[in-house]
């Protein structure tokens, strides 16, 4: 076993312990929460190690890094999530490897994703990124649709060929009423998920929580947590 393999194995075990403990505290079953390892900025060799350690879901946020990495790891039994702000000129590339896009936040992006999914003969899962720092109709500081825009955007995704409406995602906001209140933010997302499922019962995925706040996300009811640093280590600075 290489040093990196040993390191990732130990880190992964610690994260698994945290998720398991959070599930016990919340009265939930461990299998109710899926770990997505955010592999952005790390090499394909790390993805390969993680796959060997049992990781089945990985996430990326920059297509220029993700596309070659996904191609290099195409033989692995992985589900690829795209979690970054997505420009329409990158959609064709992203649709080629991403099983789910967690950052759907505007109608123009939905239209582009649908067109490319149909062209590629793929079904792409979509999560609406909810901006809890947005006003009634604005987008958030880091992308995302305001809560008031969820219903309309969800209907558009649900009616678009090649796309599947899977649920909601958020990033704990740095500004606004939920800044520094991750637990409250995630509880708000769960309320929005309940509203969404009245019209779209199958859209039951709730992606929330990262390395620093996964416990709060599990307590609120998140079905998926996105963990990078706690598994892979502190990321190198991007120049």
Image (cartoon, rainbow, N blue to C red):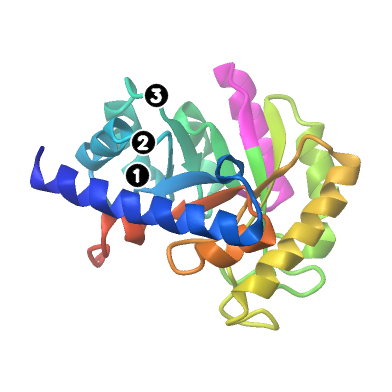
Q: Residue at x 49, y 40 (%)?
A: 81
Figure check: 5 above or below 10: above
**Location of residue 57 in the rendering, given as x and y in whole percent from the top left corner:** 45, 38
Figure check: 173 above or below 208: below
Figure check: 63 above or below 189: above
Position of 94 with respect to 140 (left or right) is left
- Asked if the magenta segment contains residue 122, the reply would be yes
* 69 and 205: which is toward the camera: 205
Q: Secondary structure at mark 1?
A: helix
The image's mark for residue 77 is 3
**Nearer to us: label 3 or label 2:** 3
* 191 and 117: which is toward the camera: 191
Start and end of the magenta stretch? 103-125
Q: Main secondary structure of the magenta part?
A: helix
Q: Secondary structure at mark 2?
A: helix
Looking at the rendering, in which quadrant would you find the N terminus? top left
Give the CA separation, mark 1 to mark 2: 6 Å
Pointer 2 residue: 67
Dot 1 alpha-carbon crowd within 10 angstroms: few under 14, some 14 to 19, many 20 or more: few
First-in-chain label (3 vs 2)? 2
First-in-chain label (1 vs 3)? 1
**Location of residue 9 in the rendering, given as x and y in whole percent from the top left corner:** 25, 46
Answer whether residue 192 is visible to the viewer in this image: yes
Dot 2 alpha-carbon crowd within 10 angstroms: few under 14, some 14 to 19, many 20 or more: some
Marks 1,2: beta carbons within 8 A: yes
Q: Residue at x 35, y 44 (%)?
A: 64
Pointer 1 residue: 64
**Nearer to us: label 1 or label 3:** 3
Q: Residue at x 20, y 38 (%)?
A: 45
Q: Secondary structure at mark 3?
A: loop
Give the CA separation, mark 1 to mark 3: 22 Å
């Amino acid at each position: 076993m290489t040093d990196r393999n040993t390191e990732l194995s130990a880190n992964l075990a610690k994260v698994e312990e945290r998720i398991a403990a959070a599930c016990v505290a919340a009265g939930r079953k461990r299998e109710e929460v899926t770990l997505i390892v955010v592999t952005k900025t790390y090499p394909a060799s790390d993805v390969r190690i993680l796959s060997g350690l049992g990781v089945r879901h990985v996430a990326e946020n920059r297509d220029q890094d993700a596309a070659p990495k996904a191609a290099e790891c195409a033989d692995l039994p992985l589900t690829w999530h795209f979690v970054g702000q997505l420009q329409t000129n990158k959609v064709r590339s992203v649709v080629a490897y991403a099983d789910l896009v967690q950052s759907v936040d505007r109608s123009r992006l939905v239209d582009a994703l649908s067109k490319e999914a149909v062209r590629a003969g793929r079904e792409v899962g979509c999560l609406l990124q909810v901006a809890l720092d947005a006003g009634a109709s604005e987008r958030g500081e880091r992308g995302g649709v305001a809560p008031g825009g969820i219903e309309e955007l969800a209907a558009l995704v649900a009616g678009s060929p090649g796309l599947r409406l899977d649920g909601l995602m958020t990033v704990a906001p740095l500004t606004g009423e939920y800044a520094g209140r991750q637990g409250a933010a995630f509880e708000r997302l769960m309320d929005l998920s309940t509203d969404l499922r009245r019209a779209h019962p199958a859209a039951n995925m709730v992606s929330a929580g990262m390395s620093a706040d996964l416990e709060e996300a599990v307590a609120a009811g998140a079905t998926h947590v996105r963990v990078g640093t706690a598994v892979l280590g502190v990321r190198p600075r991007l120049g």
